[in-house]
Amino acid sequence: MELTRRQFLQLGATSTGAVGLSPLGFDLVPARQVKQRLRVEGANVSHTVCPYCAVGCALVAYTRKAANGSVDLLQIEGDPDSPVNEGRLCPKGASALQLAVSRRRVPSPMYREPGATEWKQVSWDFALDRLARNIKASRDRTFVTTDAAGNVVNRCEGIAFAGGAAFSSEEGYLATKVMRGLGVVYLEQQARV
């Protein structure tokens, strides 16, 4: 079937009229409508602060109590009433929900033995004990008490530490203090967006 110019103009005029009448109160949607609910409808609203940097952007968190008694985090967004961020968030703040709820998050420590090709799940006790032994062995092996000129330096040159972008200010401060206490001088904090 070919569409003539006259039919095209009639169809256009009819469509424009229908679109124009719908804001005037004429319901052009079929009688059977799908009622949609907001995902956060009826949820508890909590006001909090973004954990990533010292700016102090305000967040609004929506939670709901699950049938099993646990609390589900549904959504985190910027607080539009905050004078600091006025509801806007940086990329890290906008992804704050993934800090708590992520399908890609590994739930427990994984370990790959030397020479092995597969990772295996281990306990936290095993992982922390192994980490502590490796840090102590590396520190004992590479600790420098004096430099070439005989000056006391007391530093560990065999360990480097890079803080992650998901660190809060407090975590970054604590990690820096612990590493300085071990004598580590190669420190970097990747807290930039």
Image: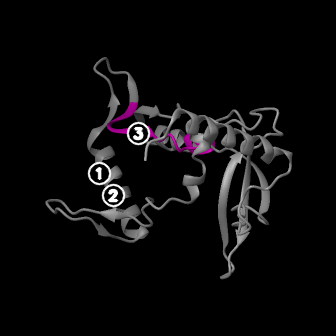
Q: Which residue is mark 1?
A: 137
Horizontal relation, residue 32 to residue 159: left or right: right
Disc 3, SS = strand
Q: Which residue is mark 2?
A: 133
Residue 161: x percent and y percent?
40, 39
Tell me the kind of residue under disc 3. Answer: Phe
Residue 146: x percent and y percent?
34, 27
Specify whether residue 52 is in view: no
Q: Is residue 177 above or below residue 104?
A: above
Please tell me which residue is depicted at 13% across the width and 60% down the height of the picture.
115
Which residue range is magenta in the image? Answer: 154-173
Horizontal relation, residue 131 to residue 21: left or right: left
Disc 1, SS = helix
Q: Nearer the viewer, residue 21 or 123?
A: 21
Neighbourhood count class around disc 2 (C-alpha, 10 Å): few under 14, some 14–19, many 20 upward: few
Q: CA distance from mark 2 to mark 1?
A: 6 Å
Please tell me which residue is depicted at 69% across the width and 66% down the height of the picture.
34
Q: Nearer the viewer, residue 29 or 189?
A: 29
Q: CA distance from mark 3 to mark 1?
A: 16 Å
Specify whether residue 186 is in view: yes
Q: Is residue 73 above or below residue 136?
A: below
Q: Is residue 68 above or below residue 161?
A: below
Number of the label disc, if any, that sits on residue 168 = none
Neighbourhood count class around disc 3 (C-alpha, 10 Å): few under 14, some 14–19, many 20 upward: some
Tell me the kind of residue under disc 2. Answer: Arg
Of pointers 2 and 3, the one earlier in the residue sequence = 2
Is the C-beta separation of discs 2 and 1 under 8 Å? yes
Q: Nearer the viewer, residue 143 or 177?
A: 177
Q: Which residue is mark 3?
A: 161
Quadrant housing residue 90? top right
Disc 2, SS = helix
Query: In the current view of this chain or complex, which residue is farthest to the top?
Result: 149
